[in-house]
């Protein structure tokens, strides 16, 4: 049916055509979701701003950040209140209403504090009555308008109907950028309670639910490009020593191995959790060493903060050797925004720029102060960004090691780091009982790619002559500037004008704040912009860039992460 004919049809036929015709895919458009940590109020409340052990004064501020960011939904990683009583859980649900009224979904799950309420069946009934969305994705605004977020909701009801809406999964996004979310709840239920020696009331175990978990993560069956796994407890924590495997870090290693393998074998890169009230990123190995996953422990959204236990504490049972620490920030309130862009997932971590808050009865600035137990106004700033891509690679670079191992290729484009070293001296706060100085942090350098699309002409009379590389992970937390390194990208020579390399107007480029391509050295911190017609040589200073026509590569000495490509500046 031609568009000319459609113009002449009746309005009914136009509507019918709109309903039946394939909709142009929005999959190329990136989308965002938010993650927030444990929300507990654990001290007095002289301002009457945090009722029923729920930190409403913190939640309100974080909600506004999510609304400004335009996220599609928010996931809360458990411990929704401190005392777990019904009135507290209702209060927490009401605190999420500003998100829902803004068209943003809210998906919570239980933490251990949901199991400690008074005679309320471990919080199951009040959770289900306030969070129907964990089974249906349906939300209701204050004005009674309804909308849905997500599709394909599933729970392991074949294990127990108690788990309906407690452990759950759903999908979000258009086909090329669709993601699956799998939430695992192992807490006590009315039909199963295991009082563990570590002090927690467990219910249906990871092992009980593993068949469902594996089926939901199955890469071939799920038909999503990304998958994320959530649970309240870390795989290996910093302040807590319990795990989701019904015990300490050494408990039930067979369960752990199967769970880790189900994530790694199905392309899951991030396991996201709470419980510890610390921003912590680590690479965790399974007990058998065959699987690895990046664990993200969420920063606190509470008046409570934990300090890491010593590395040589006996209750780690020597399992801390399975953890490689990447980043850590303690005693702060923070939140996370995940951006899904086709094969690429980028995480931005924001926290307040004050930090060093004191905990519980001393929150925020210490006992006896005028503001004791009164929540401050936060000023959130981006502290860290990192990413992965299903079409890229990840490289672990310990302190003192070279970045030159970073090398990747994608559909004819080759990217290499030619020179540079991890000169960071940052350590985390995980000490030992002898007063150590903390673990040296390892960098995770990740590559990812977007294919060059025709036409190749870009804005401002610039021409893209390679696929686009995304490079992240080379900076320290709280710092945009990275180590100095030399990056090289190959180009397609057939469209390069012979005079361009000589004039220095064909170069390694990156995107500025407005999304325009600029010479990569222009985003450096320091250094002098200096063009070399020839190959890179050891000793070239920050800001030097050039083109090697023999190897068909552009290169630059830079000190920032970013998006990179070979670009001809046709001026």
Image: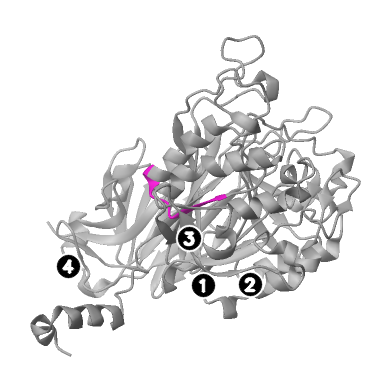
Q: Which residues are magenta?
A: 68-75
Question: 341 or 80: which is nearer to us?
Answer: 80
How far is the residue under mark 1 from the one under mark 4? 42 Å
Relative vertical location of residue 409 with respect to residue 568 in this rendering, above or below: below
Q: Position of residue 387 (x, y in %)?
A: 50, 55
Mark 2 vs mark 4: in front: 2
Q: Would you name the residue on which mark 3 appears?
A: 447
Q: Earlier in the sequence, mark 2 or mark 4?
A: 2
Give yes or no for contact between labels 1 and 2 (Cβ–Cβ under 8 Å): no
Relative vertical location of residue 275 with respect to residue 433 in this rendering, above or below: below
Callout 3: helix, strand or loop?
strand
Q: Would you name the residue on which mark 1 appears?
A: 224
Residue furthest to the right: 197
The C terminus, quarter of image: bottom left
Few, some or many residues within 10 Å of mark 2 (<14, 14–19, 20+): many
Q: Earlier in the sequence, mark 3 or mark 4?
A: 3
Callout 1: helix, strand or loop?
loop
Mark 2 vs mark 3: in front: 2
């Amino acid at each position: 049916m031609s568009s000319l004919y459609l113009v002449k049809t009746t309005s009914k036929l136009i509507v019918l055509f709109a309903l039946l015709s394939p909709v142009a895919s929005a999959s190329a458009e990136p989308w965002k979701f938010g993650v927030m940590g444990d929300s507990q109020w654990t001290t007095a409340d002289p301002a009457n701003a945090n009722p029923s052990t729920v930190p409403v004064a913190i939640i309100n501020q974080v909600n506004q950040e999510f609304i400004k960011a335009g996220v599609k939904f928010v996931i809360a990683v458990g411990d929704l209140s401190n005392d777990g009583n019904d009135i507290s859980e209702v209060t927490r649900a009401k605190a999420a209403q500003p998100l829902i009224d803004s068209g943003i979904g809210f998906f919570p799950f239980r933490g251990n504090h949901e199991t400690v309420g008074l005679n309320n069946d471990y919080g199951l009934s009040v959770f289900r009555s306030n969070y129907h969305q964990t089974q249906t994705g349906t939300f209701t605004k204050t004005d009674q308008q309804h909308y849905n977020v997500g599709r394909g909701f599933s729970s392991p009801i074949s294990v127990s109907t108690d788990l309906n809406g407690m452990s759950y999964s759903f999908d979000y996004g258009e086909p090329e950028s669709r993601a699956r979310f799998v939430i695992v709840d192992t807490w006590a239920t009315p039909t199963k309670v295991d009082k563990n020696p570590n002090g927690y009331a467990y219910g249906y175990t990871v092992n009980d639910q593993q068949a469902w978990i594996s089926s939901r993560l199955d890469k071939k069956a799920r038909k999503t490009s990304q998958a994320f796994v959530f649970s309240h407890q870390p795989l290996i924590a910093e302040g807590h020593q319990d795990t989701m495997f019904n015990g300490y870090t050494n408990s039930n290693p067979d369960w752990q191995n199967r769970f880790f393998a189900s994530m790694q074998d199905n392309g899951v890169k991030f396991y996201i959790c709470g419980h510890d009230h610390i921003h912590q990123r680590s690479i965790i190995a399974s007990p058998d060493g065959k699987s690895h996953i990046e664990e993200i422990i969420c920063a606190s959204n509470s008046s409570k903060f934990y300090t890491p236990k010593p590395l040589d504490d006996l209750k780690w049972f020597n399992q801390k050797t399975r953890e490689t620490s990447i980043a850590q920030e303690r005693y702060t309130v923070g939140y996370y925004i995940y951006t899904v862009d086709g094969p690429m997932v980028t995480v931005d971590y924001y926290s307040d720029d004050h930090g060093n808050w004191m905990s519980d009865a001393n929150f925020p600035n210490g006992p006896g102060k005028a503001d004791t137990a009164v929540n401050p106004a936060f000023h959130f700033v981006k502290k860290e960004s990192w990413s992965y891509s299903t079409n890229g690679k990840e490289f672990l670079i310990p302190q003192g090691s070279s970045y030159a191992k970073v090398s990747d290729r994608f559909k004819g484009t080759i990217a290499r780091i030619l020179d540079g070293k991890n000169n960071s001296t940052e350590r985390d706060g995980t000490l030992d009982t002898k007063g150590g100085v903390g673990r040296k942090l390892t960098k995770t350098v990740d590559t990812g790619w977007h294919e060059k699309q025709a036409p190749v002409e870009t804005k401002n009379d610039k021409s893209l002559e390679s696929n686009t590389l995304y490079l992240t992970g080379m900076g320290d937390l709280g710092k945009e500037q990275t180590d100095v390194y030399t990056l090289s990208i190959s180009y397609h020579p057939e469209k390069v004008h012979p005079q361009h390399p000589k004039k220095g107007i064909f170069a390694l480029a990156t995107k500025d704040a407005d999304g325009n391509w600029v010479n990569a050295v222009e985003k450096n911190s320091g250094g002098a912009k200096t063009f070399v017609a020839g190959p890179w040589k050891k000793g070239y200073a920050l800001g030097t860039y050039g083109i090697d026509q023999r190897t068909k590569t552009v290169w630059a000495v830079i000190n920032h992460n970013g998006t990179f490509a070979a670009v001809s500046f046709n001026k």
